[in-house]
Amino acid sequence: MTDHVELRSGVYVDSVSLMQVSRRVAATPGVEAAQVAMATELNLDVLRGMGFDVPEASPNDLVVAVRADDESAVAAGRAAVDHALAALRTTSDSAGGFGEAPPPRTLGAAIDAVHADLALVSVPGSHAAVEAFDAIDRGVSVMVFSDNVDVDTEVLLKDAAADRGVLVMGPDCGTAVVGGVALGFANVVAPGRVGLVAASGTGAQQVMSLLDAAGVGISHCLGVGGRDLSSRVAGRSTRQALAALAADEGTDAIIVVSKPPALEVLADLEAYAAGLGTPVHWATLGAGRPDLTTALEAVLDALGEPRPTWPAWDVPQQPVSAGSLRGLFCGGTLADEAMLVAGEGLGDIRSNIPLRPDLAVSSDLRAEGHVVLDFGDDGLTRGRAHPMIDPTLRLERIAVEAADPGCGVLLLDLVLGHGSHPDPGGELAEAVRSARATAAAAGRDLPVVVSLTGTEADPQGLTRCAESLRSAGASVFLSNAAAVRRAVSLVSTSEEA
């Protein structure tokens, strides 16, 4: 095996594009591993972890690392890097822009150039606040897609926005739909009369997808960031978003979607919402509270809309005789809901986003018994793309669980829509098929259940993805809560997990 590492100065490419370049190079015949990335400390640590000998570099350098069978395969890998980077430059050059005028060099200049009233910030978390303050100073609402922004900075941002009468969506706001325009990760749904305020990206997508299945459209979906209903942030953006939707003539009802909130913040918001004049419904997860599907069904009842039979693509699977539930999620709220629903029947669930501190897994994400992991958590996305874009880490863990006799049932999520991987169903189906084969070779059966969030109008196609997963042997459900209950029904109860 031959390693090649080189630095290229004066080249900058965004992390998502470089992730795609790396994947194309890794698919070159004879190449075992490839990583093309900006030489940040985090990326250099990843390369060292892969066993590459990395020279001294600066974050402004592009580092190319290829491991291949021999020198000729290395040369093929380097040629693949050159070809992929050239293709990116061609795409960029043909993208047009503003004619002969140079593009704006700062967010503020871009806002001034097009007289924008909404900005989206997606830069590494350590730089996001500067850009967001720039937008707020110009009186512009801002969606902060970036994660890894500390909570004290979030509070400062939201207080500054309130002073200027604008809204901060985020930080770590993955989903919004404003006036029919999808921002970040979002599903293709019909326009309608229900507005969403979401302290949860995948939770909002789950509710939007269920509404779509029920034939109900949305007016807007305003994300507020996953910490907005925490004690520290105290619902600052949720209040502003509720007021904005209540003032919107196209919104007849509002749903607030959230991970488990601080109870005193929730009570305060409920009192505030009661005086808005527009009905506000609560899809806020927590112990003893309804799951998202149940909460949505109550909203449909209040709207006078019929409850549909939620789509499912089930396959016959027998309960296992041994082993625990292993949930591997891309969506943090879907993982939270899985722990709450599964915990009712299975007891304690360990996690990297635990419901109680004593249920935290170790730093290597390993634990005995029932485990649910969120691969979209800040700790796993620092310096890399979200797993809804780059599923590599989760696919690797699926293979690990397949080989672990302690894994009895595998529970996965898959979220479709704009911003997500263009063919997530195909890759996940192949991983499911491989995992079941690995377990079978070891004399085990491995039931797999998938929570599939999406709509038929999404670019990836809901039914096409579901059928792909079902053909690989997985049971598939549109309702995350239904998927979890199906998985729990397959877990062994004959032994203590």
Image (cartoon, rainbow, N blue to C red):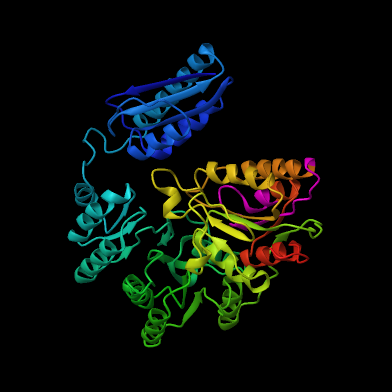
Q: Which residue occupies the foreground of this view, 201 or 346?
A: 346
Residue 452 among those drawn in magenta: yes
Quadrant in the picture for the N terminus? top right
Q: Which residues are magenta?
A: 441-466
Can you say whether 199 is above or below 328 in the image? Answer: below
At x 47%, y 29%, the residue is 51
List x then y, in percent, for residue 255.
Answer: 48, 74
Specify whether 348 is left or right of 67: right
Specify whether 352 is left or right of 324: left
On the question of residue 208 being in view, the answer is no
List x then y, in percent, for residue 242.
Answer: 37, 75
Specify whether 162 is left or right of 334: left
Specify whether 423 is left or right of 268: right
At x 20%, y 55%, the residue is 134
Residue 157 among those drawn in magenta: no
Can you say whether 283 is above or below 316 in the image? Answer: below
Quadrant in the picture for the C terminus? bottom right
On the question of residue 247 being in view, the answer is yes
Instruction: Report the number of numbered marks.
Output: 0
At x 29%, y 66%, the residue is 167
Q: Which residue occupies the foreground of this view, 191 or 367?
A: 367
List x then y, in percent, for residue 125.
Answer: 32, 51
